Image (spheres, rainbow, N blue to C red):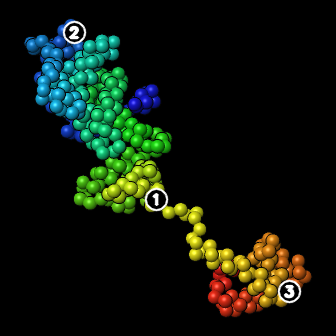
């Protein structure tokens, strides 16, 4: 479930353009209300005669309904909640602020279809459609609690922000093995929205460079966002038509030693002592110290020279002569000098 306690700290700075035009519902004609009238609360002087409000009708259970899945049943139920006009939004929101539970419920029920509309955009992202709706409804409830009708904008504009926030956070938190920080989640959502928009505009999957240009971000930043958006898969998931193998069987062990290489390495180091025996005493001392063989640490030319009592340049010359001799011996036996001295 969405963590609503953390949402309180993120009061949105609402922009009238935040909602797509199709998110603004076509409102039905307002109905008269018990108690205070919308005209009295909004300053209207001309009385409006309207019929009494009708509560949403509940469809009785039928054999046809019983055969529908849970999603369709839910959509059928919320279809009977009438939409609110701008005047009614102001009226009910003011009453909800004063603690009227019925007004709060009316605000919620009248905007359940807005949640469904927004939730559809997040399908196939790891959460079932009903789970998306449930998370979006939590955002709708929070929006009703936080909405200030005195600011002058429609409730759907304000609620859209909360609904999207709760759905996006639920997707990131509930579909991932490793939870990501909130600021990272926001970056990933920006990346996904940009990619979706460019896909529609360009009629092809946008490249990393195109997304980076659209977002005004570095290419490396976009690559990082794309990498963070990748999900995890169990190594025990079956693969193949017969499902007789799992993913783990197809993953190579990068730490495993190739048998051919292991055999060759064993032969190389088994013959190393014999090859070093082909060198002079001074050549062997230089090679052992320069390449860290036979218990010696790797040393610089100067360090080797100080140890055996010759100059740095002389050590370099001895090393060249020794490696030339070792190459001849090793190639004669079918080995590459790079296997040891590469």
Query: Is 36 rendered above or below residue 71?
Result: above
Instruction: Mark 3: give few (<14), some (14-19) or many (20+) Cα within 10 Å.
Output: few
Which corner quadrant of the image does residue 22 belong to? top left
Question: Disc 3 marks which residue?
Answer: 281
Measured in 3D between alpha carbons, the distance from the residue under mark 3 to the one under mark 1, in whole angstroms, is 52 Å
Question: Disc 2 marks which residue?
Answer: 36
Q: How many marks?
A: 3
| Mark earlier in primary sequence (3, 1) | 1
Which corner quadrant of the image does residue 206 belong to? bottom left
Q: Left or right of 313: which side holds 141? A: left
Are the two marked residues, 1 and 2, in contact with CB atoms closer than 8 angstroms? Answer: no
Q: Residue at x 35, y 36 (%)?
A: 167
Question: Disc 1 marks which residue?
Answer: 249
Query: Is 105 rendered above or below residue 257?
Result: above
Q: Residue at x 71, y 90 (%)?
A: 329
Numbered disc in front, either 2 or 3: 3
């Amino acid at each position: 479930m969405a963590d609503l306690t953390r949402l309180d700290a993120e009061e949105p700075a609402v922009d009238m353009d935040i909602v797509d035009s199709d998110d603004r519902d076509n409102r039905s004609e307002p109905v008269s209300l018990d108690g205070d009238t919308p005209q009295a609360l909004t300053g209207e002087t001309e009385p409006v005669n309207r019929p009494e409000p009708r509560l949403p009708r509940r469809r009785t259970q039928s054999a046809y309904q019983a055969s529908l899945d849970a999603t369709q049943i839910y959509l059928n139920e919320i279809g009977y909640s009438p939409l609110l006009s701008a005047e009614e939004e102001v009226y009910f929101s003011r009453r909800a602020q004063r603690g009227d539970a019925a007004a709060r419920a009316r605000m919620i029920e009248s905007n359940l279809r807005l949640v469904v509309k927004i939730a559809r955009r997040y399908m196939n992202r790891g959460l079932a459609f009903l789970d998306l709706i449930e998370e979006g409804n939590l955002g709708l409830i929070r929006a009703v609690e936080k909405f200030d009708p005195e600011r002058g904008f429609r409730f759907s504009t304000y609620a859209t922000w909360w609904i999207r926030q709760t759905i996006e956070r639920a997707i990131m938190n509930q579909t991932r093995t490793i939870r990501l920080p909130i600021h990272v989640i926001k970056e990933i959502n920006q990346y996904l929205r940009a990619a979706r928009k460019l896909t529609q505009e360009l009629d092809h999957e946008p490249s990393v460079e195109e997304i980076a240009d659209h977002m005004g971000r570095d290419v490396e930043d976009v690559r990082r966002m794309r990498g963070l958006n990748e999900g995890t898969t169990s190594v025990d998931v079956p693969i193949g038509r017969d499902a007789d193998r799992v993913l783990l069987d197809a993953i190579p062990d990068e730490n495993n030693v190739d048998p051919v290489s292991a055999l060759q390495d064993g032969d190389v180091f088994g013959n190393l002592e014999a090859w070093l025996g082909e060198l002079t005493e001074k050549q062997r001392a230089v090679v052992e110290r320069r390449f860290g063989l036979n218990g010696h640490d790797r040393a610089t030319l100067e360090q080797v020279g100080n140890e055996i009592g010759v100059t740095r340049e002389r050590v370099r010359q001895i090393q060249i002569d020794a490696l030339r001799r070792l190459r001849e011996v090793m190639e004669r036996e079918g080995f590459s000098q790079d296997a040891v001295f590469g």
